[in-house]
Image: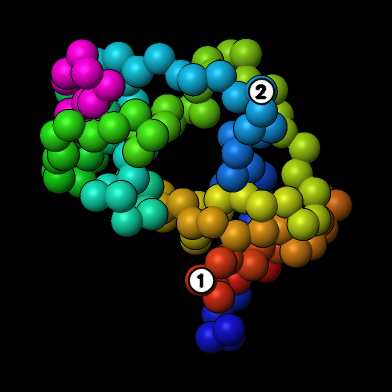
Amino acid sequence: DDGESEMRVTSDMIRPRDGGLASSVKKPVRLEEGDKIEGNYRGRGKWYPGKITRDRGDGTYDISYDDGESEMRVTSDMIRPRDGGLASSVKKPVRLEEGDKIEGNYRGRGKWYPGKITRDRGDGTYDISYDDGESEM
């Protein structure tokens, strides 16, 4: 631990690592050109916002990232819908609990990192311990 921390992370900056669904019931999401997504850039484990620019018809897609980068022929397992695959109007709030494996929008800067909830403060905010040793409290 490098000592850096942030307290009282609001629930809109946290999402369950599995999208809030048990992996056994998670259904594949249909991806289409124009969809706002997050891509696991070059398969390195960090997810960045972008959009599908081309469906190649063979299970791969071209992505244009919001930061100007792009990738071609990205497999669907390296892409996830930005809204978790649910329309925001029907998306149900996910109950977050201590010990849950999550992704946190570290310091609200738009990059999501894996971690777990270490404390539920009871006021809609949480303390997070990230897998890389960083923490938000």
Q: Name the mark nearer the viewer: 2 or 1.
A: 2
Magenta highlight: main SS: strand
Q: Secondary structure at mark 1?
A: loop
Name above or below for residue 61 compared with residue 96. Answer: above
Q: Is residue 124 magenta?
A: no
Residue range highlighted in magenta: 54-63
Residue that numbered label 2 is attached to: 25
Residue at x-position 70% and y-position 63%: 127
Image quarter of residue 120: bottom right
Asked if the residue at tag 1 contacts the one at tag 2, i.e. Cβ–Cβ closer than 8 Å, the answer is no
Query: Please, what is the three-letter code of the amino acid marked with disc 1?
Result: Asp
Q: Quadrant of the N terminus?
A: bottom right
Which is nearer the eye, 136 or 48? 48
Q: Is residue 62 left or right of residue 87?
A: left
Name above or below for residue 124 compared with residue 73. Answer: below
Q: Is residue 62 magenta?
A: yes
Mark sitting on residue 90: none
Q: Is residue 97 left or right of residue 136?
A: right
Residue that numbered label 1 is attached to: 132
Residue at x-position 16% and y-position 39%: 71
Q: Secondary structure at mark 2?
A: loop
